[in-house]
Amino acid sequence: AQKVTQAQTEISVVEKEDVTLDCVYETRDTTYYLFWYKQPPSGELVFLIRRNSFDEQNEISGRYSWNFQKSTSSFNFTITASQVVDSAVYFCALIGGGGYQKVTFGIGTKLQVIP
Amino acid sequence: ETGVTQSPTHLIKTRGQQVTLRCSSQSGHNTVSWYQQALGQGPQFIFQYYREEENGRGNFPPRFSGLQFPNYSSELNVNALELDDSALYLCASSSRTRGDTGELFFGEGSRLTVL
């Protein structure tokens, strides 16, 4: 069975602060993919990043960065210098083996950036 | 914008009724997945359709059924609606030819309220 745990259900930060969203996953598959999605109030899930299980390099994209640590089964997401537009619910997700693209999502972390 | 469109965006039904939700996948995508997202929860996988056949199913009863058409659009049907079926229903499309990398593109969802 696969499981994604996002222990932080809600986070509030003041604009320009850095914030890290935690994600811990469980899977028995040796090959898997990890994702982060952003869900604004409109409801659409916006793809942010995909990382496969063989690539543990950290990644930076503008103000966003991701820290993948296989040893601790974690895939944390950091927003640097947060902005009000970053306010949304963020989901960590996992696709393992199985022959089809079933995505297992965490419960989500609601981020509120206060001006 | 992902190119995945869903209809209707909002609807209200009563217990025991039946509902059909529709999804037009992104051009070139041959796989459609459906997810149920209850309030405050992460999306839960319902099923996936590939080349007009169901290709994987989550933990949902048979009253949740679907179709995929030759143009790869899809329908989700829910019979004998229950109050707990109230949720945001998300459609995601992807291209199987790219392998199981999980590059899913989500629509904005159909918000169903069951009274």
Image (tube, coloured by chain):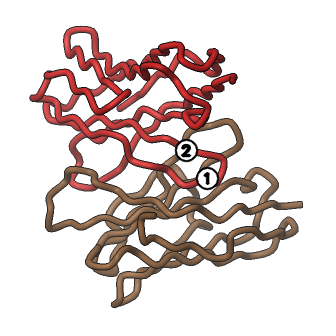
Give the left or right position of residue A103, taking residue B75 as reference: left
* Quarter that holds the N terminus of chain B: bottom left
As drawn, the residue found furthest toward the top would be A72
Position of residue B26 measured from the top left corner of the image (x, y, whole percent): 37, 74
Tell me the crowding category of disc 1: few under 14, some 14 to 19, or many 20 or more residues within 10 angstroms, Cα based: many
**Subunit under mark 2:** A
Tell me which residue sits at (42%, 27%) in the image. Answer: A4
Q: Neighbour class for label 2 at 10 Å: few (<14), some, many (≥20)?
A: some
Give the letter of the red chain: A
Q: Mark 1 points at which residue?
A: A43
Chain ID, brown in image:
B
Q: Residue furthest bottom?
A: B70
Quadrant of the image containing the C terminus of chain B: bottom right
Q: Is mark 2 on a helix, strand or loop?
A: strand
Left or right position of B58 against B110:
left
List x then y, in percent, for residue B81: 76, 65
Of B4 and A63, nearer the camera is: A63
Chain for mark 1?
A
Q: Which amino acid does label 2 sit on?
A: Gln
Residue under circle 2? A39
x, y percentage for residue B62?
56, 65
The kind of residue tagged 1 is: Gly
Where is residue A94 shown, x and y percent of the image?
33, 36
Taking the image as shown, residue B43 lies to the left or right of residue A92, namely right
Nearer to me, A28 or A82: A82
Would you say the residues marked 2 and 1 are in contact, meaning their CB atoms lie under 8 Å apart? yes
Q: Residue furthest left?
A: A54
In the drawing, does residue B82 fall left or right of residue B103?
right
